[in-house]
Each structure stands twice: as C-alpha cells, then as structure tokens.
Image (cartoon, helix red, strand yellow):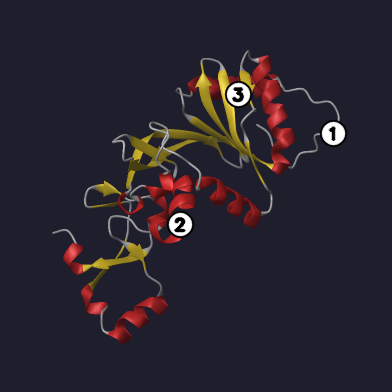
Amino acid sequence: MVNEEDDFTGPWEPTEEDLEWTRGVVESLEMNQDWMEGEMAFRRTGDTTLTLLTRTERAESASRRVEVVLQMIGWHLDMTQAKIIPDDPQLATEMMQKEAQSWMCPHCEKTPVVNMDLENAQWEVLGNNQFVDESGQESVTDRWVVGLTCECGEPIYLSPDDYYLIAGDELFYTWEGWFPIQPEQIMEAVDKGYWEDLYARPLGSSRGGKPVPLHMRGLMCVRRKEEEEE
C-alpha cells in the first residue's frame, strides 16, 4: 500500500483501490492480531482502532499515509506509544536489546522477562499473521510465538524477534535440544573425540511430531545421542 522510499513531498490522496484494499486488510484482523506493512508493525486494539507498534525512522511519512487512509474508512490510528527504530541496523539492535532488559511480566508486573526460564521456552504456532510482500500481494503465514512461564504461574508469549532480544543468539538457535553446527565445529568435535557422542541431522519442517521453527529449518543440527527420541 505504501513505500517508505516514495517521495512524500507535495499533496497525496489515496485511490479508491487503496481504501478498499486497506479496509479488507484491517477488517479481517482479529483483536490483538498484528499486521506488518513495510517497515511498520500495527496491532488491532479496538473495533475500529489500530495501534502503531514500531516503525523505522524513514517510515514516518509512510505511517502518516496509513493514518490518512484509516481516517477515510472510519478507523483510528494510535501512534502515541510507537517505538521508533533507528535506520542504522547496529543502533537499532542495541536500542531494542537495551529496552528488552526492562520488560516485565504483564500479569504480575513484578518479574523481569529476562529472569524467566529462557532455556525451556516453548515454540508454538498460534493463529496466523497477514503481510504484504514486495510485489504487493497479501499473504498469510503461521504466527510463531515463544511461550514462557512467569513465577506468578501465568504464561506469556513473545514474538520470535522479541525472544531473540531477550535470550540472545545461542538460545534463539536452540530448539528441543537441537543446535546448528558449523564445519569447523565438526572438525573440533572429531579432533577432541566427542563427535561419536553427538547425533547430527538436517532439520526439516517437523521433528518428533512438532513443527520446527522457521529459522531452524534446513540447518544441520546436533544433539546428544542420549537425548534423541526413539
């Protein structure tokens, strides 16, 4: 619908096609379901309300265009609490990692998420997400979440990206005891004599009756042989 690289100087009016396309997308969203559009992330938070969750610095004008379109179809865009992500990738990652350290359990508001049992997080598919690809085609994908349990006993669910910010690279790339192995690590395992203790497999779309998270599919992974399911 919008492109962050467009020239937004001068007047702009959405077409009827823009209005109908947007109406179809937002009205199909379930409550609290997210919608990705370019470098912006939205969430349906009311009957006719979208909340802008995040956007990049360069997507400011694009978000204003979305606001105009939503107003014209009788919707409201709440941009008051949007996280503005720097365009520089390194600065963006550092900003988000720092912020993630302050996240608290939304139920008890006492336990930091970073202090929860991150090693035993559960990857699950809960519903689906809608997004628009570079060609403008609307697509639907599985909505992956990472489940944690707070000390108060309540479950919380993080997006994969948020889990990465909290848990770091090593835990993010560990699933059900499986973790990727590189050629140099294989050589090290052989040289040090523990290769025979490992069980190596390329992960597909499912393993042991469970769907494999998208970022782990196709990777050559290993785990201890005694942990391998029968």
Q: Quadrant of the C terminus?
A: bottom left
For the residues marked 3 and 1, what is the alpha-carbon distance in whole angstroms?
A: 22 Å
Residue at the extreme bottom: 191
Q: Residue at x 46, y 34 (%)?
A: 129
Q: Which mark is residue 22?
A: 3
Q: Secondary structure at mark 1?
A: loop
Of label 1 and label 2, which has the lower sequence position? 1
Q: Nearer the viewer, residue 173 or 107?
A: 107
Is 222 placed above or below 25 here? Answer: below
From where the camera sits, is residue 118 visible? yes
Q: Nearer the viewer, mark 3 or mark 1?
A: 1
> Which residue matches tag 1?
9
- Badge 3: few (under 14), some or many (20 or more) residues near its Cα, within 10 Å? some
Q: Nearer the viewer, mark 1 or mark 2?
A: 2
Is 11 placed above or below 172 here? Answer: above
Residue at the extreme left: 230
Q: Secondary structure at mark 3?
A: helix
Is 100 placed above or below 75 here? Answer: below
Residue 37 drawn at (x, y percent): 60, 35
Q: Amino acid at mark 2?
A: Gly
Is 229 placed above or below 44 here? Answer: below
